[in-house]
């Protein structure tokens, strides 16, 4: 699985902020593989397809495929 550098997390968070989405990507776990979570700034918003599309698009531009888990908020890199 590809490793996503912390700088890419900073950049995708800046992209989300520039588009006025109240979400940030958080690195959730680094034991064995990276897992990420979209969290709302105010804790009350739910993630929609538009936000996921921005995140997918950012990583696709970096040639990194990501997959979201069933909760729609948590994701990981794909082989």
Image (cartoon, rainbow, N blue to C red):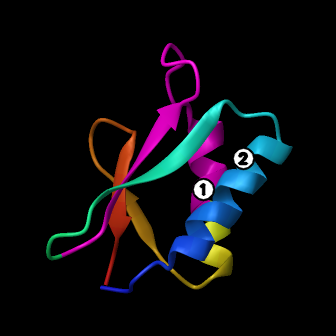
The residue positioned 38% from the left and 86% from the top of the image is 2
Which stretch appears magenta?
33-56
Residue 27 relative to residue 16: left or right: left
Q: Earlier in the sequence, mark 1 or mark 2?
A: 2
> Could you tell me which secondary element the residue under label 1 belongs to?
helix
Residue 41 x, y percent position in the rendering = 58, 27
Residue 28 x, y percent position in the rendering = 31, 53
Q: Is residue 36 above or below residue 1?
A: above
Residue 29 x, y percent position in the rendering = 25, 60
Residue 7 relative to residue 36: left or right: right
The residue positioned 68% from the left and 78% from the top of the image is 61
Of 53 and 17, nearer the camera is 17
Q: Which mark is residue 55?
A: 1
Q: Are marks 1 and 2 in contact (CB under 8 Å)?
A: yes
The residue positioned 33% from the left and 76% from the top of the image is 78
Q: Quadrant of residue 57?
A: bottom right
Q: CA distance from mark 1 to mark 2?
A: 8 Å
Q: Quadrant of residue 76?
A: bottom left
Estimate how packed mark 1 is, as few (under 14), some (14 to 19) or many (20 or more) residues with alpha carbons within 10 Å.
many
Residue 35 highlighted magenta (yes or no): yes
């Amino acid at each position: 699985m590809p490793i996503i550098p912390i700088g890419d997390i900073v950049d995708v968070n800046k992209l989300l902020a520039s588009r006025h989405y109240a979400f940030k990507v958080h690195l959730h776990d680094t034991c064995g593989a990276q897992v990420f979570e979209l969290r709302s700034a105010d804790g009350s918003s739910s993630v929609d397809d538009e936000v996921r599309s921005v995140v997918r698009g950012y990583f696709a531009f970096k040639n990194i495929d990501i997959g979201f888990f069933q909760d729609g908020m948590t994701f990981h890199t794909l082989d």
